[in-house]
Image (cartoon, rainbow, N blue to C red):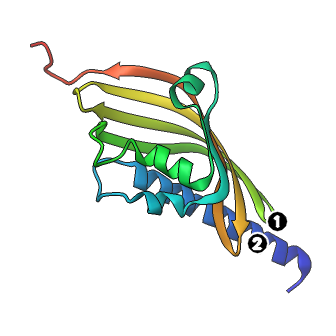
């Protein structure tokens, strides 16, 4: 196989692996679902991973977490058995993935619908900028950045009537 064709194949395989990795991450963060173990989240991240909120509102809400275990514990802290969410669904759009060798960068717009334990519901629009690294043949999240672009309260039909 010539070098250019091999490079194209590696790029396509990297993009596909990153896409599956993001789908798995979002699936683990959706509620309801089967109980997510923190170890399942940890497996998606590099040992030296960073997860952070960027932008003034998102930084204040989420801060920055360093290291696979700290990231997994932070994200897992929002999931059952925590009663934080009654419903939490993620939808990724506007995908852009760039692969160069064993490194990749991705950007998505994420829509998130959440209903909390107190019955409040919100819709979020968030930009995700994520760096990935291929480690021993497995693509992992190296640096996860989330920036809230908007959020609005949702109302249940029939509320107040």
- 136 shown above or below 118: below
- 91 shown above or below 150: below
For discs 2 and 1, the disc positioned in front in the rendered view: 1
Residue 40 at x, y percent in the picture: 45, 62
Of 123 and 74, the residue lying toward us: 74
Q: Is the N terminus in the top left, top right, bottom left or bottom right quadrant? A: bottom right
Mark 2 touches mark 1? (CB < 8 Å): yes
Q: Secondary structure at mark 1?
A: loop
Of 90 and 45, the residue lying toward us: 45
Neighbour tally class for label 1: few under 14, some 14-19, many 20 plus, Cα within 10 Å: few
Q: Secondary structure at mark 2?
A: helix
The disc at residue 153 is none
Residue at image mark 1? 101
Of 153 and 35, the residue lying toward us: 35
Left or right: residue 118 versus residue 148 is: left
> Residue at the location (31% across, 36% down)?
84
């Amino acid at each position: 196989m010539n070098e250019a064709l091999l490079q194209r194949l590696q790029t396509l395989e990297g993009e596909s692996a990153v896409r599956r990795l993001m789908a798995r991450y979002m699936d683990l963060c959706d509620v309801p679902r089967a109980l997510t173990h923190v170890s399942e989240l940890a497996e998606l991240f590099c040992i030296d991973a960073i997860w952070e909120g960027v932008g003034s509102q998102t930084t204040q809400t989420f801060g920055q977490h360093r290291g696979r275990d700290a990231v997994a514990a932070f994200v897992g802290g929002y999931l059952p058995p925590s009663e934080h969410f009654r419903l939490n669904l993620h939808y990724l759009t506007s995908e852009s993935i760039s692969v160069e060798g064993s490194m990749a960068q991705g950007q998505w717009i994420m829509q998130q619908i959440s209903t909390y334990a107190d019955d409040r519901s919100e819709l979020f629009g968030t930009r995700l900028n994520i760096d990935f690294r291929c480690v021993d043949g497995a693509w992992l999240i190296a640096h996860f950045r989330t920036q809230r672009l908007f959020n609005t309260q949702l109302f249940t039909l029939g509320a107040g009537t």
